[in-house]
Amino acid sequence: MKILFVASEAVPFCKTGGLADVAGALPRILHERGHDVRLVLPRYGDIDNNRFRLLPLMPEMKVRYGERTLAGSILRCSYPKSQMPVYFVDEPSLFGRKGLYGNSHGDFPDNDVRFAFFNMATLWLLKGLDWQPDVIHVNDWQTGLIPALLKNHPEIIGDSFYQEIRTVFMLHNLSYQGNFDRYIVPSIGLPWSVFTQDGAEFYDKFSFLKSGIVYSDKLVAVSPTYSREIQTKEYGAGMEGALQQRANDLVGILNGIDVSEWNPETDAMIAKQFTAGSPAGKRACREELVKIGNLDKDSAHPLIGITSRLVDAKGFDLVEKAIDDLLALDAQFFILGTGDQKHEQLLKETAAKHPGRMHVHIGYDVPLSHKVIAGSDLFLMPSRFEPCGLTQMYSMKYGTIPIVRKTGGLSDTVFPATRASIEAGHGTGFLFEEYAADAMVAACREAITLFKQHPKAWSTLMQNAMQQNFSWQRSAEEFEELYRSLE
Ligand code: ADP
Ligand code: GLC
């Protein structure tokens, strides 16, 4: 099949979160499985031309936007260590700056123009290449305009080139919606008929997310549980009605993890490699993490790691509410993250008061994130909602036992550990249901007790976790089936 994958971030080019991991892995896996897959990304200022050897492909890419003509170009390269073509939509005044969606002052005020251009240029690019994909796989609000353009833009619906192209909209996170002033509608050449309750109108704004939900041919959420949750008021972020209407076209497919990136056997960023059969190297990883964090050298207490965006949705309001109770536990903490200032500030202050017990590293640091995942005994992820979550899967691969809230992809990937379920080979982690500080602390306490009092059960638990199969191959088959259903 011919598949165009369009995303606003993908490793190793640009990344703010898990979307980049998925957009860097899934298309490449599908490409390896024999499909003609190509990836389109914006050409952000941070992307290094020399490192990735970007070459000019189309020198002029003009897009009308209201009274303006936006003029960009297209660059290309092959995905590193693969033959998969990657196209970059370049327009320096829109993408040449630092940051993907915003900076410390907030979202960029011209994100509507930036991503409208990106979406339109992607469709014009196909014409320029004279390459008609069977499916365009779009991701999150930043690419949600493409389905609306394909079904409503006069120049596109009048052009037989685009007639057979189908779209799949992948939902990674409904809380980012891309809702903008309604005047974007005529500016991008769409008819006002899209600006209705049944269309892309959302509380008097034009919503890129809703546009994707309404006009795509199929919808896929990043985990089965999230696909159900988002049809409820609690998790739907206002889109539940539109999603219920599309229920027959909505499926959940669990993300995989890229084992060429996250594998304790080959990971060059950790102190010592290890495997399920020979886990001794994990001790060296733990020692290194203790050293980096200046933590007390006491391996009788478990080390609880966190690597996360520091935002409420990831459960940091709970962590802060429970901070005294957490610090009263027999455990040490290593927290790596960046995000909301209020969380950064409070965590830093707390760590300063508890040297040896808690270390907080504010920043975005990929090698350190590998060290945290590899060197911790437990990994805490108390998300209020979690579409899929990748770090709990990475942790399990490294024998680091997750403590998670039972929501979204977390409940699809972590199976409750009891003495019996561990013995039976099922249990892989600790879950709590209610989004409450007490419930989280109780789950931590349960994990710590098992760690300290039942070392044999603990090592079986680590084995169970490390042997989980989170590979992309399984999900790739489900995507192939989904694409085929569009024919
Ligand atoms: P989300 O996409 O909601 O942030 P995921 O668990 O899907 O959550 O993915 C998060 C990704 O971002 C993982 O690859 C994780 O390792 C990475 N990450 C998060 N915070 C940091 C950080 N401070 N430094 C390095 N990597 C980080
Ligand atoms: C989003 C979600 C996260 C998911 C990731 C990749 O960032 O918040 O749960 O794992 O996308 O799909």
Image: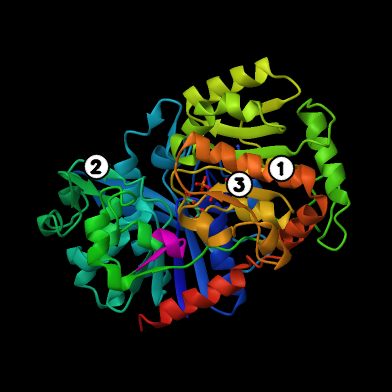
Figure quarter occupied by ligand 1: top right
Left or right placement of residue 77 versus residue 147 in this view: right
Q: Is mark 1 within 8 Å of ligand 1?
A: no
Q: Residue at x 24, y 42 (%)?
A: 180
- Residue 421, how many percent across, how many down? 66, 63
Q: Nearer the viewer, residue 365 or 388?
A: 388
Q: Are marks 3 and 1 in contact (CB under 8 Å)?
A: no
Q: Is residue 224 magenta?
A: yes
- Residue 141, how many percent across, how many down? 35, 51
* Residue to which mark 1 is pinned: 449
User: Residue 102 appears in which quarter of the rendering?
Assistant: top left
* Residue to which mark 2 is pinned: 180
Mark 2, residues whose alpha carbon is within 10 Å: few (<14), some, or many (≥20)?
Answer: many
Residue 210 shows in this picture: yes
Q: Residue at x 82, y 30 (%)?
A: 291
Q: Dot 1: what SS?
A: helix
Amino acid under disc 1: Thr
Real-space Cα separation, disc 1 to disc 2, in angstroms? 50 Å
Q: Nearer the viewer, residue 190 or 406?
A: 406
Mark before the other along the chain sequence, 3 or 1: 3
Mark 3, residues whose alpha carbon is within 10 Å: few (<14), some, or many (≥20)?
Answer: many
Q: Residue at x 34, y 63 (%)?
A: 123
Q: Dot 2: what SS?
A: strand
Amino acid under disc 3: Ile
* Residue to which mark 3 is pinned: 403
Amino acid under disc 2: Phe
Q: Nearer the viewer, mark 1 or mark 2?
A: 1
Question: Which range of residues does the magenta coloring cover?
Answer: 219-226
Q: Are marks 2 and 3 in contact (CB under 8 Å)?
A: no
